[in-house]
Image: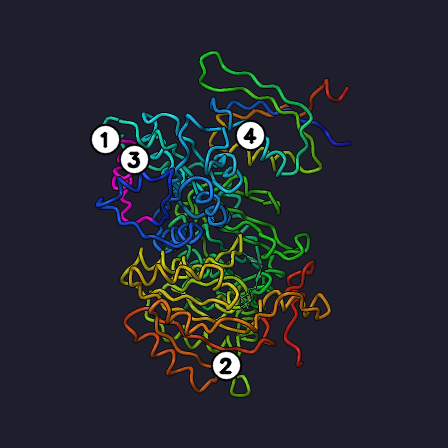
Amino acid sequence: MMTPHTLTIRTRNDAVAVERLLQVTRYRGFQLVGMQLHGQADQQGMVIELQVQSERPLSLLTGQLAKLYDVLQLDVHEVQAQLRA
Amino acid sequence: MTGAELVIQLLAQHGVHSVFGYPGGAIMPIYDALYQSPVKHYLCRHEQGAGFAAIGYARASGNTGVCFATSGPGATNLVTALADALLDSVPVVAITGQVSQAVAGTDAFQEVDVLGMSLTVTKHSFYVRRVEDLAATLHEAFLLAQSGRPGPVLVDIPKDVQLAQVSAHLPQLAEVATPAGAAAFPAELAEAVALLQQSKKPLAYIGGGAHMAGALPELNQFLRATGMPSVTTLKAMGSVDKYNPLYLGMLGMHGTQAANLAVQQCDLLVCLGARFDDRVTGHLARFAPHAKVIHLDIDPAEINKLRAATVAMCGDLKQLLPAMTVQLDNPAWRNECAELKHQFGWRYDHPGDRIYAPAFLRQVSDALPANTIVSCDVGQHQMWVAQHMQFGSPRNHLSSGGLGTMGFGLPAAIGAKVSRPDDMSVLVTGDGSFMMNVQELATIKRFRLPVKIIVLDNQRLGMVKQWQQLFFSGRYSETNLEDNPDFVSLAAAFAIPGHSISRKDEMADAIESMLNWPGPYLLHVRINELDNVWPLVPPGAANQEMLMETAP
Ligand SMILES: Cc1ncc(C[n+]2csc(CCOP(=O)(O)OP(=O)(O)O)c2C)c(N)n1
């Protein structure tokens, strides 16, 4: 069974940042199984949580996301409890 | 000043003296600011041509290439060139005009969501909403295009931003961030050195990243000191000193037998700025099957992407290579590689009167002045160029590698000539590819650019025909070009003289006339449609399973 992973990504506050994350996720062969988006009060950025799964190693996605100009920080939570349940 | 004037001033500030482009409604303020400015604009005859000219300019010089296009069809025409620059990591800044923000999102005339369209073909793209952000954004675009792994960056500027007033204050230019040096990798370097010392059959696999890092002196010193045999990718041809006796040539689908056999036997592969592309590896799981891998690349996303690395470092090759330079002692392996090189050298003895493209290109290569830039298109002729011509630097061999884009060559040769006016620029193209951006002959004419054009005419889409012959039972679907135009007359329509040859005994004089002619020139070379590119690693095969020419 494919393990879902949660990525917490802080981006610049630009709507196109979300498009880029989704495009890269799809193109690199990952399925999107959940997503939450929070604007920052100071309008300095957004925090986006992506739940993704794939047959491919997660590093193939995180490596590509981390190098996007819009991505300021990327954290991985290996296994997402509520999605496994 | 206006936003448009600021754009032109910023280009000058970034040392951009030449740009390639095509005007239209949404970019008219920028073209107005360009009028009588010190920035020289090369009007190409299609935005794709402008994009490839910017790539040729960048690849031949190492500087960022700049192209302009208007909104809608202008910007969509740039897409192929942007994709080409992305896959070959070429620093390009594309500036597109966009409809005014007042009508944005209304399907206005010539409105396309260029930011959305560009996402998959650029390293990054910007849409400038406020004229106050324009300077910083353009500056950021230039930094991004050059930094880390270079690539194309697009800046989409709405017309109202181009027309708005802004203070003339130019931002302070920041430096391109320097990549991590040797001090950042003490443990990895120790491990790499240990692997090198343990290895009995080490081999360097060199990609375009080495020269883009400016690390060719360090690379050649590393190869000399370690005595390590080496192979290069298409993009790295010209990186290794041509007198290096253990340089085995290009590896991969149309690589040399020596290169492919050595890679398959090595026990340590030192991958320097390369990415295990499928045209290089053949069957990935069977590529270099006995090798541990040391992988050095500026882009962390390339590490472990296709081949797991035993040791990896993402940093500055100029520092990392000296830190890995140790003396090695593997005489048996060195002899084995030297023997492979000797055994599988190219042969140019070819019976009959007709022109054999590999021998012809070898003869051209030998006749070219030092530092000539050779651009090519895509297909069989591209592989023959890589196999049979010699280059003193990767900047002298412009070939569309990652995207494999027909139509690349002519505009790339134009851009190369603009960036290095004192060096000769030669295009080797196929009769199919040439027609894909043939309109750029008008650019050559307009600017009197002395580009030498060699059309290798097999009256076929040769590479596709070769695959049809080998893998599709000789069903030649849509690859016959026997109705080609008369290429010499075509060139003449653009005031470019030319000559046509079809026999070996005509080659020497024709090459000499072309090279001695002071202006642009087209040499049309008829070759046999049956000639194919060898060796060839068939799809799905491992690299030692090369097909060789068999008697017809
Ligand atoms: C834009 C584009 N379309 C299609 C292809 C597929 N393709 C690869 S090689 C080739 C034939 C090229 O013919 P020609 O330029 O005459 O060169 P030759 O192979 O005959 O030397 C084609 C159609 C491509 N690489 N690029």
- Looking at the rendering, the stretch of residues picked out in magenta corresponds to B1-19
Residue B196 belongs to magenta span: no
* Chain letter behind tag 1: B
Q: CA distance from mark 4 to mark 1?
A: 34 Å
The secondary element bearing badge 3 is classed as helix
Instruction: Specify the label residue A19 is tagged with.
Output: 4
Q: Are marks 3 and 2 on the same chain?
A: yes
Badge 2 and badge 4 in a common chain: no
Q: Nearer the viewer, residue B46 or B147?
A: B46
Name the residue type under label 1. Met
Q: Calculate the distance from the C-alpha at mark 1 to the C-alpha at mark 3.
A: 8 Å
For disc 2, the marked residue is: B355
B157 over B298 or under it: above or below: above
Does the segment drawn in magenta span residue B14? yes
- Report, in whole angstroms, how far the alpha carbon at label 2 lies from the one at label 4: 53 Å
Up the image or down, B314 lies above or below B366; here it is above
Q: Secondary structure at mark 2?
A: loop
Mark positioned earlier in the residue sequence (1 or 2): 1
Q: Is residue B384 rendered to the left or right of residue B267? A: left
Three-letter code for the amino acid on which mark 2 is drawn: Ile
Quadrant of ligand 1 in image: bottom right
Q: Nearer the viewer, mark 4 or mark 3?
A: 3
According to the picture, the residue beneath numbered tag 1 turns out to be B1
